[in-house]
Amino acid sequence: MSIAKAVLFAGVGAGAVITGLSCGAQQAQAAGVKDQTPVFTLKVYTDLVQVPTLVLDHDQQSLPPIEPKRFQVSLDGGKRFAPTHVRLEGDDPLDLAILVDASGTQRAGLALNVAEAAAAMAAKALHPQDHVSVYTLSCNLLRTAYEMPPDPAALRNAIENGLNSPKLGKDSAGRSCGRDVYLWGALTAIITDLNKATGRRAILAVSDGQDDGSKISWDALHDYAGAQGVALFGMRDPGRVWQAWRGGRADPFRSLCESTGGIILETGRRGLEKQLEQWVKLLRGRYVVEFPRPQQLTQAHHSIEVSVKRDGLAFVTLAGVSVTLPDPKLTSDPHYLPSQEGADIPVGKRRPSPE
């Protein structure tokens, strides 16, 4: 059985169902208007949990379609249960961010060709409902596009503008900001930037994965990406892998991506366009595992596991997910109609460890 784990964050919000006569209908009845049809107000529960789950073979290549009944879910180490629905992500709107690392020798690597390759990818793989943001990284972080439609020419220009910006590598006073690269901090800033995006969010960092000492730790970034439901992907030239993890040593960039719903894609310049298309194909090929919000869920971080039965060699990774709990002020309303969905979903007692 292949199992992947992520973070489920439950927070209090305004989601609820309230039914009742509107003010206008009440006034009409009070005035004795008998023929007017009463008007009802309906607010909808936000109680469906959707978990984007990437399932590949042991070489991280695509698999034939998997039967929905083979998926199982466990919360906080509790008893496994079957999701109510499993579907392919397909044409769900995507909110993508592309981060181009142009620091040091990176500038002579994939960064040279990423603008043209991204433009070609947008023309072939992205849809009008998708959105793209573009960032460039050296010792500072620049944003040259935010939530723009996937127009190939505009995407090419945004990437080129970042690579050629006179502000790249400079501090606010226009002086060189040095050679250190704070990749973890940059990814954290981008996740925050995408906070209001409504599509399925994913970041692709075109980088060898070097971080020179960001103030935010690997653990904090990992948990933040999970709580915000952002899948992290990396793309790098295997011939330019950072020296620190050559020879089989720890690869924090790979482990970061593979534990937040993404993977590392490796390619040289000639294969860049194809791998960018593969990135979008992987996103659209994810399974969306759905089930009602458990009634006994509390406001906190919870662990969520998705497993695939009868496939011990599959590679499974899932993005974190956030759900909204009803506001106690609303649940105490006399017109509140509680939902019984999710009452039978088990939740264990093994919470994620604090940072």
Image: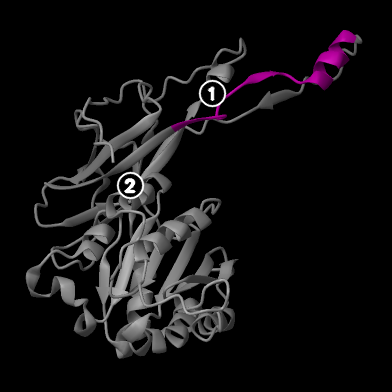
Tell me if residue 63 can be seen.
no
The residue range painted magenta reads: 11-30
Which mark sits nearer the N-terminus, 1 or 2? 2
Please state which amino acid type lies under the numbered disc 2: Asp
Is 98 magenta? The answer is: no
Please state which amino acid type lies under the numbered disc 1: Asp
In the shown orientation, is residue 296 left or right of residue 148?
Answer: left
**Residue 122, numbered circle:** none
Q: Which residue is mark 2?
A: 223
Q: Residue at x 28, y 77 (%)?
A: 236
Q: Residue at x 51, y 34 (%)?
A: 46
Tell me if residue 56 can be seen.
yes
Circle 1/circle 2 CB separation < 8 Å: no
**Relative to 193, residue 278 above or below:** below
**Relative to 188, residue 138 above or below:** below
Residue 207 sits in quarter = bottom left
SS class of the residue under badge 1?
A: loop
Percent x, y of residue 217: 31, 53
For mark 2, does the 10 Å Cα neighbourhood hold few (<14), some (14 to 19), or many (20 or more) residues?
many
For mark 1, does the 10 Å Cα neighbourhood hold few (<14), some (14 to 19), or many (20 or more) residues?
some
Is 23 magenta? The answer is: yes
**Relative to 242, residue 220 above or below:** above
Percent x, y of residue 40: 71, 23
In the shown orientation, is residue 119 left or right of residue 314?
Answer: right
SS class of the residue under badge 2?
A: helix
Residue 103 sits in quarter = bottom left
Work out which quarter of the rendered image holds the C terminus and state it.
top left
In the shown orientation, is residue 207 left or right of residue 159?
Answer: left
Percent x, y of residue 70: 20, 44
Q: Which residue is mark 1?
A: 327
> Which label sits in the foreground, 1 or 2?
2
